[in-house]
Image (spheres, rainbow, N blue to C red):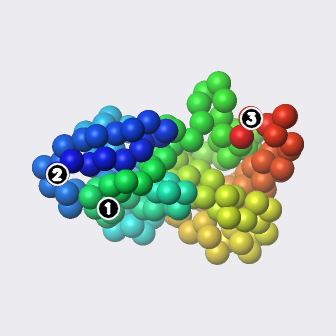
Amino acid sequence: MTLECTLNGAPLQLELEDPATPLLWVLRDALGLMGTKFGCGRAACGACTVLIDGEAVRCCSYPAANVVGKTITTIEGLGSPDAPHPVQQAWMEEIVPQCGYCQPGFIMAAAALLEKIPQPTDTDIDQHIVNVCRCGTHGRIRKAIHRAAALLAVPSTENPR
């Protein structure tokens, strides 16, 4: 099967042996994008969260065949070292990570949340960001999401996003 989609802003064509292969393994093994992490393999922890057509999706159990014709954004495509996405910038400013393993998934989930709810309340964050962090950085994550919302609220001439 030929997988045709847009990945991190670029067209992608890739031959898949098994269309049921989880998207996570296509990203990591076939494409070498190691930012998206394997956590549980059951779509429960959120370490594997990517954006598919702007929606946060846990890709460890999402068949790659389901992304045909869609737009996928991984942590590698969200921003860059020179121009981080406001969520990535807020994560750095608030020094969110401890071990950091789960943080790409949290960042992607936060980016999706802020697209839907630009100024989320703590309740909004608690209801929408249900990823798991074993290090317990949830308080810093909430603070960083509020910081990212403030960064996104800056007029477009001052904020490239």
Q: Secondary structure at mark 1?
A: helix
Q: Secondary structure at mark 2?
A: loop
Is 103 situated left or right of 42 in this image? right
Instruction: Name which of mark 1 and mark 3 comes first in the sequence.
Output: 1
Label 3 crowd (10 A; few <14 / some 14-19 / many >=20): few
Label 2 amino acid?
Met
- For image coordinates 52% across by 61% down, the residue present is 56
Quarter holding the C terminus? top right
Q: CA distance from mark 2 to mark 3?
A: 38 Å
Tell me where residue 70 appears, x and y as whole percent. 41, 54
Mark seen at residue 121: none
* Quarter location, residue 20: bottom left
Residue that label 1 marks: 66
Label 3 amino acid?
Pro
Can see residue 74? yes
* Quarter location, residue 6: top left
Label 1 amino acid?
Asn
Q: Residue furthest left?
A: 17
Tell me where residue 65 appears, x and y as whole percent. 27, 58
Is 62 situated left or right of 117 in this image? left
Label 2 crowd (10 A; few <14 / some 14-19 / many >=20): few
61 shown above or below 73? below
- For image coordinates 68% across by 64% down, the residue present is 116
Q: CA distance from mark 1 to mark 2?
A: 12 Å
Tell me where residue 33 appears, x and y as whole percent. 38, 37
Can see residue 110? no
Residue that label 3 marks: 160
Instruction: Name which of mark 2 and mark 3 comes first in the sequence.
Output: 2
Label 1 crowd (10 A; few <14 / some 14-19 / many >=20): some
- For image coordinates 56% across by 52% down, the residue present is 108
In-front residue for pair 158/144: 158
Residue that label 2 marks: 1
